[in-house]
Image: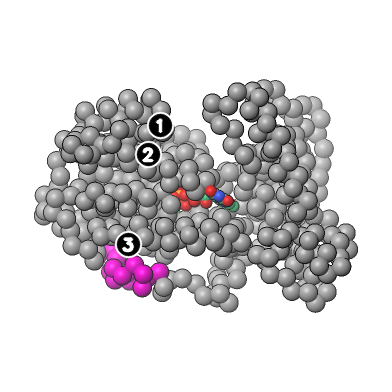
C-alpha cells in the first residue's frame, strides 16, 4: 500500500470506473492521497456491464486506462465496498476527514417503463436492459451466478437510444447463432457482429429468411432521424442539424440491414397486455413530433411479443443520505454535481451528465477536476487556483469555479495524523474484503475465466 503523502489532501472517490479513475489519477498526480471505493470486485463499471462484449478492443483499452490510473502511487483501491451500504455516504463525507469526496457512481438503475403497474411483470414478460446486458456480458464466464435470460425471437424492445440498439443486436445475433447451431454451423459472436448477419449467412449459402426468424422490433416514440446515433453539435445551424439527421437515418438503415431488427417509430408505450399473469405485449400510442416535443395522438394500437425489454435509459441508484429530485440526485449545480449540505462533494461522469458515453464521462471528470477540484484543493500552479477553468466549458461553470476558489481555495490540508487515520481506515476495509494492495494481482484474481 502506498505511503501517505504528508502534504497532500485526502480525497475519496466513489466508483472506480471511467470517470472515477480519471479523477483519482489526476488527484494522485497532484499529490493527493486518494481512496477509491468501488462496489464491484473490478472497477470497470459500464465498460464491463454496459458496453456489449463484442467491443473487445475498446473494452481492453478502457480496462487498461482505468487500471493505469488506479495503480498510480497515492491511489488506494477499495473494492467490494458499496457506499450507502457498507459505508455511509454522510459518514464518509463528514467523519472520515476527507478534504473532498468525488461521486462517480454512474447510473445503474433502469428508468421505469412509464406504464402504470408495469413493474409487477418484471420476470413475467418484462425485462429491463441493465440486467439483460449484464447477463449477456457475463453469462459465458465460469461460475456466473447472476440473473439469466434467454434470447428469444419476436421480442418487443422499447427504446430509441444507442443502448436499445445494442439490446436489439444481442437478440438478433444470439437468435441467429442458435438457428445456425441447429444446422450444425457454429459462428463466433464477434465475427457475426463485425461482418453482419447477411454476409455470414451468405457464406453458408443462406439468406435471413431461411432461418425462420421474425426478428425483434424497437418501438421508439420519436422518428428515425431523431435517434442519437450521431450528436448534433450544440452550435449547429439548421442546415448542419438537417445533415446530421439524414446521416442518422442512413446509419440506422445500415444497422437494420446488418442485424435485421425492425423499428416502429412514433410509438409510446401506453398500456399492458396481460394474460394469465404474464405480460404478453403492449398497447402503444401514436405520437407526432412538434419541434422537439413528442405529442400523443388519439390513435393506439397493440403489439404482442415473446417478451418486452425496456431500454429507455439509466438513472442513479439512490444512495441513503443523498436527497433525490424525482429519479435523479438533487444536485444544486448540474455542471459540478454539487449537493446541498455536502460542501466537499463534487460529482463526475454519467451520474451528473446523464450521457451514456465513455468519452463524455472521462472528459467531464477532467473538466470538474480542472474547473473545481483543483481550485477547491489549491492544486493549481500558484497553489491556489486550478488551471484555467473548463477550457471547453461554459461561462456558468467558470463563474462557479471562481466562487469555489474564492471561498475554499485556502482549504487547510489535513494533518499528517489525520491522513494516517484515513489511510488506516481504508487499509482496514481493504483487509476486510481481502485486498492486499497489489492492484494487478487482485485484478488477476477476480477476473472471471471464460467457461
Ligand atoms: C448497453 C450499453 C452500451 C454502451 N455502448 C457505449 C459505446 O459504444 N460507446 C460509449 O462511449 N459508451 C457506451 N456506453 C456508455 C458507457 O459505457 C458509460 O456511459 C460510461 O462507461 C460511464 O462511465 P462512468 O464512469 O461515468 O460510470 P460507470 O461506468 O457507471 O461507473 C460507475 C462506477 O461506480 C461504481 N458504483 C456505483 N455505485 C456505487 C456505490 N454506491 N459505491 C461504490 N461504487 C459504486 C460502479 O460499480 C461503477 O464501477 C454504453 C452503455 C450501455 C449500457
Instruction: Indicate yes or no: mark 3 CB to ligand 1 under 8 Å.
Output: no
Q: CA distance from mark 2 to mark 1?
A: 7 Å
Q: Tell whether 26 sits left or right of 211.
A: left
The front one of 209 and 338 is: 209
Which mark sits nearer the N-terminus, 2 or 1? 2
SS at mark 3 in the image: loop
Which residue corresponds to the image point at 74% horizontal and 27% vertical from the top-left?
288
The C terminus - image quarter: bottom right
Asked if residue 372 can be seen in this view, the reply is no
In the image, 76: left or right of 421? right
SS at circle 1: loop
Tell me residue 190's x, y (percent): 65, 64
List x then y, in percent, for residue 60.
Answer: 49, 62
User: Of residues 359 and 100, which is closer to you in this image?
Assistant: 359
| Residue 22 image offset from top left, x and y in percent | 37, 50
Q: Earlier in the sequence, mark 2 or mark 3?
A: 3
Which residue is identified by label 3?
71
- Residue 63 seen in the current view: yes
Residue 368: name its quadrant. top left
Name the residue at 86% across, 61% down: 207
Colour scheme employed for the rendering of this structure: one colour
Q: Which residues are magenta?
A: 428-443
User: Label for residue 18?
Assistant: none
| Crowd rating for badge 2 (residues with CA inside 10 Å; few <14, some 14–19, many 20+) | many
Q: Give the main secondary structure, helix, strand or loop, of the magenta stretch.
A: helix
Determine crowd level at label 1: few under 14, some 14-19, many 20+ residues with C-alpha closer than 10 A.
Answer: some
Give me the C-alpha separation between circle 3 and circle 1. 29 Å
Please give the residue where the numbered disc 1 appears in the rendered image. Answer: 393
Which numbered dot is residue 367? Answer: 2
Question: Helix, strand, or loop for circle 2?
Answer: helix
Tell whether label 1 touches label 2 (CB within 8 Å): yes
Amino acid at each position: 500500500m502506498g505511503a501517505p503523502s504528508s502534504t497532500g489532501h485526502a480525497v475519496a472517490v466513489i466508483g472506480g470506473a471511467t470517470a472515477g479513475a480519471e479523477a483519482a489519477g489526476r488527484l494522485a498526480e497532484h499529490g493527493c492521497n486518494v481512496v477509491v471505493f468501488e462496489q464491484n470486485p473490478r472497477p470497470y463499471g459500464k465498460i464491463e456491464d454496459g458496453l456489449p462484449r463484442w467491443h473487445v478492443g475498446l473494452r481492453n483499452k478502457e480496462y487498461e486506462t482505468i487500471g493505469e490510473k488506479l495503480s498510480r502511487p497515492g491511489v488506494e483501491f477499495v473494492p467490494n465496498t458499496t457506499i450507502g451500504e457498507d459505508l455511509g455516504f454522510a459518514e464518509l463525507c463528514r467523519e472520515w476527514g476527507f478534504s473532498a469526496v468525488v461521486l462517480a457512481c454512474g447510473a445503474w438503475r433502469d428508468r421505469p417503463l412509464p406504464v402504470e403497474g408495469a413493474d409487477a411483470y418484471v420476470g413475467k414478460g418484462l425485462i429491463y436492459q441493465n440486467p439483460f446486458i449484464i447477463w449477456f456480458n457475463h453469462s459465458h464466464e465460469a461460475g456466473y451466478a447472476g440473473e439469466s435470460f434467454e434470447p428469444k425471437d419476436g421480442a418487443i424492445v422499447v427504446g430509441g437510444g444507442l443502448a436499445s440498439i445494442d439490446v436489439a443486436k444481442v437478440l438478433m445475433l444470439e437468435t441467429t447463432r442458435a438457428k445456425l447451431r441447429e444446422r450444425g454451423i457454429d459462428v463466433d459472436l464477434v465475427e457475426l457482429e463485425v461482418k453482419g448477419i447477411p454476409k455470414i449467412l451468405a457464406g453458408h449459402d443462406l439468406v435471413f429468411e431461411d432461418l425462420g426468424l421474425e426478428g425483434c422490433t424497437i418501438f421508439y416514440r420519436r422518428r428515425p432521424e431523431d435517434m442519437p446515433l450521431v450528436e448534433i453539435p450544440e452550435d449547429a445551424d439548421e442546415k448542419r442539424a438537417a445533415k446530421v439527421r439524414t446521416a442518422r437515418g442512413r446509419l440506422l438503415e445500415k444497422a437494420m440491414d446488418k442485424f435485421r431488427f425492425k423499428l416502429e417509430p412514433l410509438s409510446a408505450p401506453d398500456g399492458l397486455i396481460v394474460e394469465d399473469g404474464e405480460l404478453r405485449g403492449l398497447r402503444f400510442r401514436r405520437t407526432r413530433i412538434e419541434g422537439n416535443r413528442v405529442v400523443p395522438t388519439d390513435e393506439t394500437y397493440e403489439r404482442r411479443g415473446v417478451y418486452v425489454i425496456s431500454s429507455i435509459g439509466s438513472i442513479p441508484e439512490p444512495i441513503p443520505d443523498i436527497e433525490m429530485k424525482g429519479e435523479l440526485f438533487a444536485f444544486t449545480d448540474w455542471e459540478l454535481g454539487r449537493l446541498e449540505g455536502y460542501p466537499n462533494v463534487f460529482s463526475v461522469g454519467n451520474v451528473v451528465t446523464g450521457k451514456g458515453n465513455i468519452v463524455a464521462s472521462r472528459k467531464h471528470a477532467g473538466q470538474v477536476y480542472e474547473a473545481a477540484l483543483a481550485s477547491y484543493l489549491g492544486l493549481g500552479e500558484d497553489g491556489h487556483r486550478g488551471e484555467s477553468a473548463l477550457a471547453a466549458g461554459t461561462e456558468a461553470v467558470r463563474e462557479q469555479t471562481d466562487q469555489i476558489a474564492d471561498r475554499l481555495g485556502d482549504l487547510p490540508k489535513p494533518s499528517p495524523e489525520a491522513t494516517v487515520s484515513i489511510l488506516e481506515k481504508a487499509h482496514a476495509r481493504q483487509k476486510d474484503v481481502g485486498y492486499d494492495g497489489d492492484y494487478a494481482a487482485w485484478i488477476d484474481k477476480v477476473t472471471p475465466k471464460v467457461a
